[in-house]
Amino acid sequence: MALPESAVLFRDESLLVLNKPAGIPMHASRILADQPDTLLIEARKLTGKMVFMVHRLDRPVSGTVIMACDKPAQAELGRQFELRQVEKCYLAIVRGWLDESGIIDHALLPPPDDRKAGSVARNAVTRYRLVATTELPIPVPPYATSRYSLVALYPETGRRHQLRRHMKHISHHMIGDTTYGRGEHNRMFRERLDCHRLLLHSWSLSIRHPVTDRPLRFQAPLDSEFSNIIN
């Protein structure tokens, strides 16, 4: 897929900020060796520059992604992520009704495909805020109706699959999550609501410009599938 110009949220000599579509991998891997489209390749085609990754989103996740246009900018932005100076907000739809707000402080081992002998759990913290709830007259056994929450998630650490695993930990699995989610809810969303994606979106990122040090906040609009589900 070719990235449209509308996917560009911000661009200057040092930065490229994109609204990543769901389903496109960030970069090539041995698992995806036959995948011709990656966000990195498409970003380079779009800009005509050798842009560099600063952070990653999982393939099924959409939303705000920051890339650097040169190595010094990449190093400075990487430093901000490493020091947890970047403010992140994600939107997700999860099963059940959450409390108004809370903190999930639950250490995580690396995922099984990245786990080695001697791997230890590392601290992982996510704050959340309830945005909205709904109850649908659609049975998901053993219940006669189904309840869901739209939540804002604020990861304070950056462990792999952290948000999806933290939601599973508190039994509010993300909809569309085929790795950590609940099949009966994913199936209902596919069959009754025509939703075929993980409902997790990188809504906003706040950084400091790697050259000018000016504070910047970027926000990525939801795609039509996510917006339709919210509506």
Image: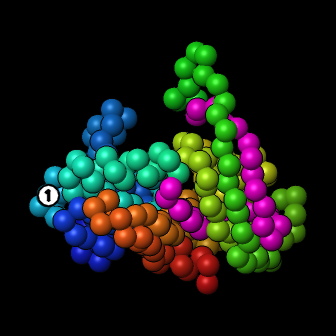
Q: Is residue 48 above or below residue 157?
A: below
10 Å neighbourhood of mark 1: few (<14), some, or many (≥20)? few
- Where in the figure is residue 9, as x and y percent of width and height? 33, 74
Check the picture and name the quadrant holding the N terminus.
bottom left
Q: Looking at the image, can residue 228 be seen?
A: yes
- Where in the figure is residue 47, as x and y percent of width and height? 16, 64
Q: Which residues are magenta?
A: 85-111
188 relative position to 211: left or right: right
Q: How many marks?
A: 1
Q: How is the image coloured?
A: rainbow
Q: Nearer the viewer, residue 128 or 215?
A: 215
Q: Nearer the viewer, residue 154 or 187?
A: 154
Q: Residue at x 24, y 49 (%)?
A: 72
Query: Please, which residue is most extreme toward the top here?
Result: 117
Q: Say which element carries label 1.
A: loop
Task: Please say whether residue 39 is one of the residues in the magenta stretch.
Answer: no
What amino acid is at disc 1? Lys
- Where in the figure is residue 225, as x and y percent of width and height? 50, 74
Q: Residue at x 36, y 53 (%)?
A: 77
